[in-house]
Amino acid sequence: MSLTLADARIVTPEGVHEGWLTIEDGRITHVGHGSAPGAGLSVGGRHVVPGFVDLHNHGGAGGSFPTGEQDRARDAVALHRRHGTTTTVGSLVTDSIEGLARAAASLAELCEEGLLAGLHLEGPYISRARCGAHDPALLREPSPQELAGLIKAGRGHLRMLTIAPELPGALDMIRMAVAEGVIAAIGHSDADYEQTITGIEAGASVATHLYNAMPPLGHRAPGPVAALLDDERVTVELVNDGVHVHAAMLRLAYEVAGPGRTVLITDAMSATGLGDGDYALGSMQVHVRDGVARLAEGGSIAGSTLTMDVAFRRAVQEVGMSLPDAVQVASLTPARVLGLAGRIGSIAVGKAADLVVLSDSLEVDGVMKDGVWITEP
């Protein structure tokens, strides 16, 4: 089947132009300027952007990826798709090795179906001092043997591992992860500047939710933030919900790292889309009040209730990004991190027709995945 979207403001990393695009068999086959040749579906001058890519997402709609429950995971994916996220990585939290292996094995089936783009282990190889909403009783020192078992359980779908580089054995685990095709991310770490540099030299290439769960930026003790921002090999994640990071600090990171090394993530948990109440994140109990998720004991931030459309809108309206740059940090740059930029992440001939139609106020009016409408404009 062939479908042409006409009267569109098409947003690419290079700019915004009025034009049209044609989709055949789930792929973009033509992108043009001006009026579409022949009849097409008019989107009435709305913006058309590539589907969002979320590298770090724990769930939504009552579903929590860490439990490994497939039906609830499907609910979470469906919720985020309605909000424009056409590619989702399912993030697990600290658990026993047996619990992580079970969840990874179950969610691997969803990866094989194409519902998830891979799995992310956020823990258990993280710092007790910076564990945030992770159960400190379940934290462990890095073990290559354990990691090999988790990779096997995930049947090759483990895409990212968050690790604190200062832990004993962490550098060897980073090297092993990278050799196995797993992205090593520095996060939930109490490392200083030098230890962070050592982790990057070992192969770490992502900063897990920059600023959060790590020592703050200091003018005499620059800490991990300066090391991660300054190194061209590192892509930095940012939770743009107005709670995790002040807009001024997000703007600072974006200006230093640029759109090619900055990605927006949700860090969403099961309460996303449901409202205030009491929930669980792994083994930890979480209170959500006024849309903010915090541990029931201690009050640490425990993920978010953010969706990518809100993060995208805030990037433009609160942080001051241009639309092309916002498209890059929400779609193309995370696609590159996953090694999928040849297929998704931008509107270009030959790529998957993963598209989001946005109003003038950047509200979602329509979502398409592989050429099929999830929500029709």
Image: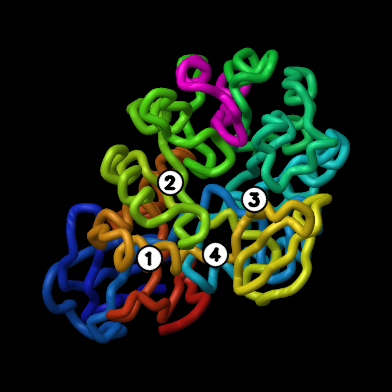
Q: Secondary structure at mark 2?
A: helix
Nearest the camera: 252 or 58? 252
Residue that mark 3 sits on: 90
Q: Are marks 2 and 1 in contact (CB under 8 Å)?
A: no
Q: CA distance from mark 1 to mark 3?
A: 23 Å
Magenta segment includes 335: no
Q: x and y percent of residue 98 in the render? A: 88, 36
Q: Position of residue 224 (x, y in %)?
A: 47, 28
Distance Cα–Cα, label 3 vs label 2: 15 Å
In the displayed structure image, the side of residue 323 where residue 72 appears, left or right:
right
Between disc 1 and disc 3, the foreground one is: 1
**Residue placed under numbered mark 2 in the picture:** 335
Please name the amino acid that badge 3 sits on: Gly
Q: Quadrant of the C terminus?
A: bottom left
Q: Where on the picture, by quarter, is residue 299? A: bottom right
For numbered disc 1, what is the local secondary structure? Answer: helix
Q: Can I make out residue 370 in this image? A: no
Query: Residue 233: percent from the left, percent from the top?
Result: 38, 26
Which mark sits nearer the N-terminus, 1 or 4? 4
Residue that protrudes farthest toward the right in the picture: 98
Q: Considering the numbered disc 4 on the image, is that residue within a helix, a strand or a loop?
A: loop
Residues drawn in magenta? 176-200
| Disc 4: which residue | 306
Q: Residues within 10 Å of mark 2 (few under 14, many from 20)?
A: many
What amino acid type should be assigned to the residue bearing mark 2? Ala
Which amino acid does the dot numbered 1 rest on?
Answer: Arg
N-terminal of the pair, mark 3 or mark 2, is 3
- Residue at x 57% of width, y 49% of height: 56
Q: Which mark is residue 138?
A: none
Disc 4 residue type (three-letter): Leu
Closer to the eye: label 4 or 2: 4
For the point 83% across and 50% down, the residue is: 283
